Amino acid sequence: MSMRRIGFIGIGNMGWPMAANLARAGFEVVVFDARDELARSFVENHRATRAPSLNDVARLAECIITMLPDHTVVRQVILGDGADCVAGALEPGHLLVDMSTSDPTATRALAAALSLRGVHMVDAPVMGGVAFARDGSLDIMAGGDGEAIDLLEPVFAAMGRKVYRCGRLGSGHALKAINNFVNACALMSIVEGLAMGRKLGIDTGVMIETMQVMCTGRNHPIDKKVIPHILTRTYSTGMTLGFIAKDLRIAVDAAHGAGAPAPLAQQVCELWQRAGEALGLDRDQAEIVRYWEQASGVTL
């Protein structure tokens, strides 16, 4: 059995290039977005079909991928509340893949509801951002039944460079949140250290060079965010402050739900939320540097 007819819900900054790579790989792609003009534009530029409704996505595809803002939107799109939804046309054998950054507890609850219909679910959030979505080199963290993930391997191969099998359903979403916490914490500590150094009169370039050599070797936030986006003042990582704050909240809630202490994660979450509220939750994550620059009175 193979999954060739793919329904893709959510043609945003990440969803568009991911769906485009599926179409280029020869999959029969059916797209839907709440902003219908995006779906219409997508089918004008790619070999794909536009679904006029969520119900039609399930009717026209055997595998449905969601790439949406959060688990609340995912559940509404799939199960609805009497309105148009995917579940209206779901049949046994359908496979739902949530590639959004969702709460793992909510993911398991949705999967339980779908299992009553004979529908399997896999959670498969991604790491890498828009640039990696464009060139199909995303890292994919998959949670769920091994046989279902086996079926999805060709689908994932069209969008990513590697699939990490994380364990039971919800584990992919949990690991995505944890990875985002580690990255967010590292970026915040780098920005704070750079702001401290500038206040002390140290050159930004010298600090970056020493951090790369003396602190952690290859530092992901320095290489991927500080140098290309913060120091150039382009702020175009493709991820907003609000989404990072949301992902951190997922990590903290998941830790607390499992009885794991997470005092640092809690503090980082609160700091990102405050920075987002001060600067604008819709601003690029790299703009968090402004929070420290404004407080320190320096410019990196």
Image (cartoon, grey):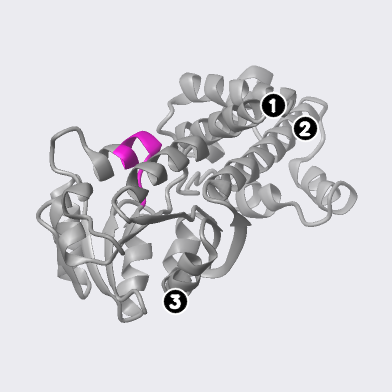
SS at badge 1: loop
Please say if 242 is above or below 235.
Answer: above
Residues at marks 3 and 1 touching, judged by CB atoms closer than 8 Å:
no
Residue closest to the eye, 191 or 55 = 55
Distance from the alpha carbon under mark 3 to that under mark 1: 37 Å
- Quarter of image, res 19: bottom left
Label 2, residues with CA under 10 Å away: few <14, some 14-19, many ≥20: some
Residue that carries the numbered disc 2 in the rendered image: 193
Give the amino acid at mark 2: Gly
Residues at marks 3 and 2 touching, judged by CB atoms closer than 8 Å:
no
| Marks 3 and 1, the one that precedes in the sequence | 3
SS at badge 2: helix
Going by the image, does 228 lie left or right of 11? right
- Quarter of image, res 79: top left
Distance from the alpha carbon under mark 1 to that under mark 2: 32 Å
Q: Position of residue 29 (x, y in %)?
A: 25, 69
- Image: magenta residue range: 67-75
- Point out the frontmost of discs 3 and 1: 1
- Point out the frontmost of discs 1 and 2: 1
Residue that carries the numbered disc 1 in the rendered image: 259
Residue closest to the eye, 227 or 4 = 4
Label 3, residues with CA under 10 Å away: few <14, some 14-19, many ≥20: some
| Marks 1 and 2, the one that precedes in the sequence | 2
SS at badge 3: helix
Q: Is residue 38 a member of the stretch shown in magenta?
A: no
Residue that carries the numbered disc 3 in the rendered image: 154
| Marks 3 and 2, the one that precedes in the sequence | 3
Residues at marks 1 and 2 touching, judged by CB atoms closer than 8 Å:
no
